[in-house]
Image (cartoon, grey):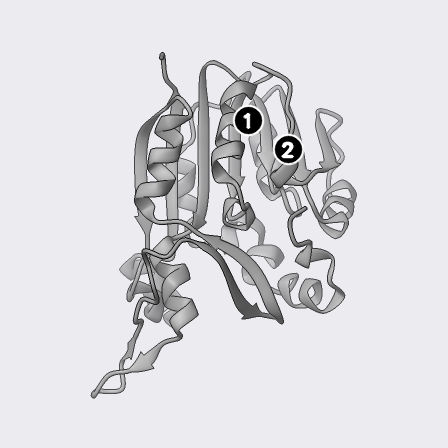
Amino acid sequence: MAQNIYDNASFFAGYSQLPRQVKGLDGAPEWPAIRAMLPDLAGKRVVDLGCGFGWASRFMREQGAVSVLGLDLARNMIERARRDTADPQIEYRIADLDALELPAAAFDLVYSALAFHYVADFARLAATIRRALAGGGHLVFTIEHPIFMAAVQARWIADESGRPTWPVNNYAQEGERRTDWFVDGVVKYHRTLATTLNTLIGAGFAVTAVNEFAPTPEQVAAMPALAQERERPMFLMVAAETAVR
């Protein structure tokens, strides 16, 4: 079973104050880029993996999805999502992505934001998602960029001018990484960019778009604290479709 850090009271208290949790999708700087990668949602059956507070699940329905299933490991997340959602076509359930089972060909879109880097066996998950998608189905997801994850592990240091630099720590060494974020010992799994994309291809996906997201100059001007996030890509964003074998 994956580490359930989001049901830790101290972690959850800090996490709930992040701008993306207070403001929803408008508080996530990467949201305009990820929205542009989504297919037309009208009539789609969607599963939202790692749905959190349900911001994206509700957006999907607003854009015409016929149904949305939101899954998350944390009871705190599911309870909040249920409180904030009145739409009967959105269902939320507790589920562990490390042991996920989904019905075959039951969905047209699998969406996930910043959840897959908590999954130990990405190959298993990719195969599960592929089976769950109907013909012509779509997968769109974001994860911490593997360079970002490796750099955070190394911590940033200042160069001679005092500007922060981000040395990368053992990028080629894949596997479990632990970091301190609100609490000590948060477990994530580092995979190279090549491993992530090749795993999708091996599972039967055709990768259609890749975005190595960093804040735009306009976003930095509006929120100067984002300036250091342009030193290395924050997020890896991927769109893929079911491929014919």
Residue 50, by quadrant, is top right
Q: Position of residue 94 (x, y in %)?
A: 74, 39
User: According to the image, label 1 marks what residue?
Assistant: 128
For the residue pair 115 and 225, the one nearer the viewer reads as 115
The residue positioned 73% from the left and 35% from the top of the image is 92
Q: Classify 10 Å Cα crowding around label 1: few (below 14), some (14-19), many (20 and above).
A: some
The residue positioned 28% from the left and 66% from the top of the image is 231
Count of number-bearing discs: 2
Using the image, determine if residue 121 lies above or below residue 153: above
Name of the residue lying farthest toward the left: 160
Q: Classify 10 Å Cα crowding around label 2: few (below 14), some (14-19), many (20 and above).
A: few
User: According to the image, label 2 marks what residue?
Assistant: 100
Using the image, determine if residue 222 lies above or below residue 35: below
Residue 172, by quadrant, is bottom left
Question: Is the C-beta separation of discs 1 and 2 under 8 Å?
Answer: yes
Using the image, determine if residue 93 lies above or below residue 190: above
Using the image, determine if residue 171 lies above or below residue 128: below
Residue 202, by quadrant, is top left
Q: Position of residue 63 (x, y in %)?
A: 54, 28
For the residue pair 91 and 73, the one nearer the viewer reads as 73
For the residue pair 43 and 71, the one nearer the viewer reads as 71
The residue positioned 35% from the left and 67% from the top of the image is 169
Q: Given the image, on which type of amino acid does mark 2 rest?
A: Leu
Q: Given the image, on which type of amino acid does mark 1 rest?
A: Thr
Question: Of the residues under marks 1 and 2, which one precedes in the sequence?
Answer: 2
Q: Position of residue 82 (x, y in %)?
A: 77, 41
Q: Position of residue 233 (x, y in %)?
A: 32, 57
For the residue pair 218 and 149, the one nearer the viewer reads as 149
Whether residue 114 sits left or right of residue 163 in the image: it is: right
The residue positioned 36% from the left and 66% from the top of the image is 151
Whether residue 162 sits left or right of residue 71 in the image: it is: left
